Amino acid sequence: VNHVVVVGAGLAGLRTVEALRGRGFDGRITLMGEERHRPYDRPPLSKAVLKGDADTSFVDTDLDALEVDFWPGVSAKSLRAGVVETTEGELGYDGLVIATGAEPIRLPGDGLQHVLRTLDDAHELRAVLVPGARVAIIGAGWIGAEVATAARRAGCEVTVIESAPAPLTTAVGAEIGARTVPWYDGIDLRLGAMVDAVDEGGVRLVGGEFVEAHVVVTGIGVRPAVGWLADADIDLHNGVVTDEHLRASLPGTVAVGDCAAWWSRRWGTRLRVEHWDTALNAPDVAAATLLGEEAVYDPVPYFWSEQFGHMIQYAGHHPAGERLVHRGEPEGKWSAVWLTADDTLAAVLAVDRPRDLVQGRRIIDAGHRLDAERLVDPQVPLRDC
Ligand code: FAD
């Protein structure tokens, strides 16, 4: 391989550049990204940046030392074998990294909708979260809950509109989500409410009710940013389809991060995980694959969220579980574990209980079984269950 082109200058793209150099690749690397910024971390956008505790979250890296041609503000428009067409013309490659991440889904309507994906989005939103502002947040998922946390703290009047029966339902199910409802103290939480459209001055619900708002934030999820690959000869299905080596169907091509749907050996299914840990760690495998080395990406997926003064951490893949067991009462620090039919640990979700997370992640990795009777006692460490 002589020239590697990395499309997408987020964390996954940057880490792939670092991993290529770390593995001794001394050919040419071009890193292009649609945003004008150098690579930055997104988790702080809905936390420190939105609260005003930080203005930026740039990744600590030295692009000069990496000897990478960095092209900020340049988008890939289409792909054919060996050539990326960009907004600055055609660029040939013999190794390609697809790291274009994901983009927020918007709702119909003519009213202004804020989304929170980029540093610029975070600055725009922060500027309007002022005391007394009526803020309607659509979606009580990870982003919605974190934005609600910041908006309430900023002294806004907050309404959260969620179509499911509980927050976080899509991500971890209504039973877990219901435990977070009391956290929405002082917030008008509308559950089971469907949005029809975002209009001037607020949000129109199905059924006709109008929720007035100065600021509307849409946090209903993202989709993989693969529109530019629509006409390319590459398998797409819920993102870029890859094998367990992160190799895409087009020769010389790998995909990493939020846009990649990789084959998980561990779970025997295809996974696309929109979380920071994947963008951090998958690139080393992708770089190895591109350089013809043998490597497999087979993690126990992990993520966290900070909302309403609580730290939620999750590891595993709960759809593989059959039974949910709670540890601890919802008023305090608690966690929940999903067990498979034979009591193997499939996933753990910990609220302010970091030890359960750390131990649970190791147990999942090792494939150990747990004793459900002991599990329900939150005093018994997970590793002793
Ligand atoms: P991205 O970060 O999306 O980077 C992709 C880049 O590619 C973007 O800069 C995009 O502009 C660019 N691009 C797209 N299309 C093109 C194109 N055609 N040409 C050129 N460039 C293109 N995860 C957690 O685990 N915990 C958290 O607490 C957490 N908080 C989050 C908070 C926010 C507000 C957001 C948005 C995400 C959060 N995440 C969190 C998720 C995590 O940040 C993502 O999983 C991670 O950023 C994915 O990295 P990526 O490099 O794959 O994609």
Image (spheres, rainbow, N blue to C red):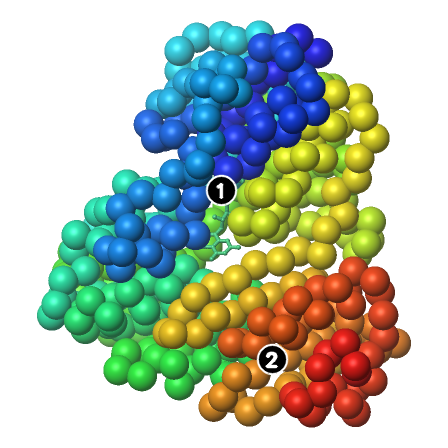
Q: Amino acid at mark 1?
A: Ala
Q: Which residue is mark 2?
A: 335
Image point (79%, 83%), residue name: 385
Q: For the point 52% across and 62% down, which residue is it?
A: 304
Q: Is residue 183 above or below residue 153?
A: below
Q: Quadrant of the N terminus?
A: top right
Residue 75: quadrant of the picture: top left
Name the foreground residue: 49 vs 138.
49
Determine if the C-beta at disc 1 is less than 8 A from ligand 1: yes
In the depicted view, which residue is nearer to us: 23 or 361? 23
Amino acid at the residue labelled 2: Ser
Q: Residue at x 57, y 76 (%)?
A: 353
Task: Please identify the quarter of the rendering in which residue 338 is found.
Answer: bottom right
Left or right for 307, reference 217: right
Residue 114 appears in view: no
Q: Position of residue 253 (x, y in %)?
A: 68, 23
Most distant residue in the right direction: 342
Say which label, 1 or 2, has the lower sequence index.
Answer: 1
Picture coordinates of residue 166, whole percent (x, y): 47, 78
Mark 1–mark 2 Cα distance, whole angstroms, equals 29 Å
Residue on which the image places disc 1: 102
Q: Is residue 262 left or right of residue 177?
A: right
Q: How many marks?
A: 2
* Up/down of 82 relative to 165, above or below: above
